[in-house]
Amino acid sequence: MYLKNIQLMSDGDRGNLASQSLCMTEMFLYELEKKFQTKDCEAIVLICGSFKDYKLISTSKDEPDILFLKNTYELEVPFRYSEFEHAINKKKILADTLEKAMLYLCELKNWDSQLVKATFKKMKEKEYKAEIKGRTKLSPDKKRKAYPLIELDLKQFTLYLVVEDNKRNILDKKLIAKTDNYLEEISYHMRELKWLTDHEVALFKRAHKTVYTSIRLS
């Protein structure tokens, strides 16, 4: 079993922590490269609040739904939302909170703490700039490749269509959409990536009619 999802939540903040932390939780999962193996945990919910210490309060859901997988851990995490709310280094605070919680669970459940530490080291080296690169598609003549690129920030997600040559030089990068920080909104613009010719690639939307944005190379 592998870790698939992780969320930070806080009571009484109208979902602000949950939405703003998505950039860091998604970056963490992406940098893990789907390698984090557990015996009985697919998802983790970090309940952040004025707790004195970490406490694992649940390890499964009796009635899993679209929000929570059956094998979901719930962990109480010490966190001061009032300080976070006015901080200028929010991404670092979120990353540190996430790392400490993960290392606590690693010790408790004998998970791979070295992989967690290495992942957060990569995130720090990237200055917590969260980017998710989608699946690459080669042009029919195999001279170029295209992929969607999502940049995740605290309050906004930005989607680009990128075309590179075989030496990884970027030939074009086109803005597709800017959305609020909800992956569902970004996914609307990512139904299918398809090369129309050797020189034109299109990213189709999830719409009833055929709608797409394309890059045409000279």
Image: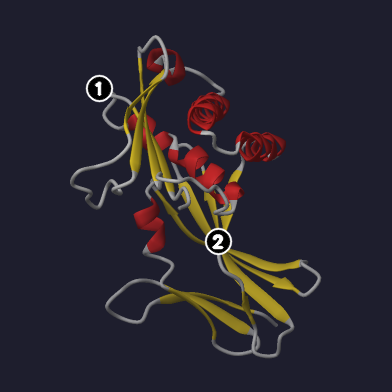
Q: How crowded is the residue under tag 2: few (<14 C-alpha within 10 Å), some, or many (20+)? A: some
Picture quarter with the C terminus: bottom right
Residue identified by numbered label 1: 12
Coordinates of residue 177 in the picture (x, y in percent):
45, 59
Coordinates of residue 1 in the picture (x, y in percent):
45, 53
Q: Camera-side residue: 129 or 34? A: 34
- Position of 89 with respect to 189 (left or right) is right
Coordinates of residue 10 in the picture (x, y in percent):
32, 25
| Element carrying mark 1 | loop
What amino acid is labelled 2 in the image? Answer: Tyr
In the rendered image, the vertical position of residue 151 relative to residue 96, given as above or below:
below
What amino acid is labelled 1 in the image? Answer: Gly
In the rendered image, the vertical position of residue 81 relative to residue 124, given as above or below:
above
Q: Camera-side residue: 157 or 49? A: 49
- Position of 92 with respect to 164 (left or right) is left
Residue 136: image quadrant is bottom right
Residue identified by numbered label 2: 160
